[in-house]
Amino acid sequence: MKGSAIKYEKDNIDTDVILPGPYLKIHDYNELAKHAMEGLDRDFHKKVKPGDFIVAGRNFGCGSSREHAPIALSYSGIKAVVAVSFARIFYRNAVDGAFLLPIEVEEETYRDISDGDELELETAKNEIRNLTKNKTYRMKPFPDLIGKIIEAGGLFNYRP
Amino acid sequence: MAKTLFEKIWESHVVLDEGNGRSLLYVDRHLVHEVTSPQAFDGLRMNHRRVRRPDLTFATMDHNVPTDNRSLPIVDQTSGMQIRALERNCSEFGVRLFGMDSPDQGIVHVIGPELGITIPGSTIVCGDSHTSTHGAFGALAFGIGTSDVEHVLATQCIWMDKPETFEIRVEGRRRNPHAVTAKDIMLSIIRRIGTGGGTGTTFEYRGDAISELSMEQRMTICNMSIEGGARAGLVAPDEKTFDYLRGRRYLPEKFDDMVEYWRENLKTDGNAAFDRCFTIHVDDIAPQVSWGTNPAMTVDVTGRVPFPSEYAGGFPGEEKAAEKALQYMGLKPGTPITEIHVDRVFIGSCTNSRLEDLVEAAKVVRGRKVSQGVRAMVVPGSQHVKRQAEDLGLDRVFKDAGFEWRESGCSMCLGMNPDILASGERCASTSNRNFEGRQGTGGRTHLVSPVMAAAAAIAGHFVDVREMGLT
């Protein structure tokens, strides 16, 4: 999985900026996507390309339980969010509907990746390659259940 | 082996244990509202599934509902659609609904306990992050997303990775509990552990200062567990819990027998170990006011708006975050908190809209007037709260002072209904999140307790309510 990094040097990017409350009434996912990250970056929908990764700091997705947040990112083209840590409801919502991969990395990795870097993700090896900087980083392995749900392709395909 | 309260409730609900903490848990109560459920019901329909336990599923509408005149049609068409979708879904799937016209309607986390749906030792889920509120009764209560809502509707079970346990020990005695409230205790905790401090854990609040709290105050504490990053928050049930619940409508028939069992079993064993611990002493805490754009960005009312470097304590990321927060909030570092003027005051939300919150706020308001230029509103958490408050004459106290007295709902907590801030407006709010845009695009939120919000409405700026001689 390859894509370029859209980096936000910020911790605690909350679900209210990922998808502001007024849009929770929208049921069309492509329409939701037009408002992704609107609370933080009004140009996001113009710059995002299919396959891009968001790179951010600690506690990404904190706040509300709205699944609309990972859905909006996913339908705008984001395939993975690479962050130092994730709030747990967002983390789960991201994989339940196979919307995107929530990838946890060390603080140094987050600092090292620059906006626009080309990244390649190899979850089987727990590796992220930075093709621009010619470096390889470790990603933290998924917790047991999250890994199983990802493997199954979403919650409703998961069988114990 | 000695066990924590969390472990006891968790283990008694495991249907399937796949190892490494990966478990399928039984869900005792499922609360549903109009915003996170439509796609879940669509999913059931598409897959020809039914709701497995409609008798354990309870729905209401709160996020979208207008809080002014309910006899008028809903102006916002998309809100109206979500509300009608829930009505249709509940009738099609046989789910009990406390709808717009129901005398039981209210914020889902207010009506759960009030109707006796919330009981100790149970597991409760809802497509809302503040489901942690129900932990005040010793219920293990998680907020979940829409896919999980669908999964629970279909199976009455949820897959979970077992969270770690985090003891939050709250010790000491507040000098004036009418001025320094549960909200101030909770903001003090979040300020110290950070908004991600409890990620991947379940809090258990323990200690003298928790035992002395009323059930409503415990709900305020547990409500904001999610703001400290935790999946859930718990308080072990005690006589106050059982007394609060006794006689409520949806309690199990064998309530008294269950009380016996709960009294005996629902507590952390003496020598049980927690994965993590944090202790706070409340003797000297002051009323809290948030100045930034997350709930950890909070100071004492006697303090000043911090300088970013001072707030950051050497972490460059934090310094930038504080700079950005100050810019958004339109605040200058060094400004005394009591010199911050407000345009709006909101007393409401699942954090602080229960009867006791309104009783306490009314003490501040009685015989006074809302400051000129301030628009203030009280939004009771449920129709029950509203009627009880009216029986006590609180509606008159607030209205005479110049407050708006509204119908129950989430209102100005989250910018999904007509109650929003205009860009640049500054609000003293008893809600739970001060995120950018939370109360409306460009709106500026200061999180405070109900008495602090009421006092700000009267003075037009923040004041230290300890100086008001509240009893």
Image: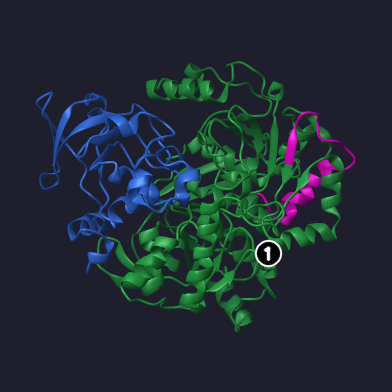
Residue A12, quarter of picture: top left
Q: Which quarter of the image is occupied by the C terminus of chain A?
A: bottom left
**For the residue marked with disc 1, what is the amino acid?**
Lys
Reply above or below: B78 against B92.
Answer: above
Up/down of B102 relative to B143, above or below: below
Q: Is residue A116 visible?
A: yes
Q: Residues within 10 Å of mark 1 (few under 14, many from 20)?
A: some
Chain A tint as drawn: blue
Colouring scheme, one of rainbow, by chain, secondary structure, one colour: by chain
Q: Chain of mark 1?
A: B
Task: State the image coordinates of residue B314 (x, y, percent, origin top left).
Answer: 41, 20
Image coordinates of residue A150 in percent, x first then y, are 21, 55
In the image, is A135 to the left or to the right of B193?
left
- Bounds of the magenta segment: B351-376
Residue B66 magenta-highlighted: no
Image point (44%, 62%), residue name: B38
Using residue A159 as the reference point, say whether residue B188 is left or right of it: right
Which percent across, then down, holds residue B189?
55, 40
Q: Residue at x 23, y 35 (%)?
A: A49
The color chain B is rendered in? green
**Relative to B456, residue B66 above or below:** below
For the point 22% across and 26% down, which residue is it? A113
Residue designated by label 1: B240
Quadrant where the N terminus of chain A lies?
top left
Side of B413 where B173 appears, left or right: right
User: Was residue B370 drawn as part of the magenta stretch in this picture?
Assistant: yes
Q: Is residue B266 visible?
A: no
Which residue is more in the foreground, B47 or B387? B47
Question: Circle 1 — which element?
Answer: helix
Q: Residue furthest right?
A: B367
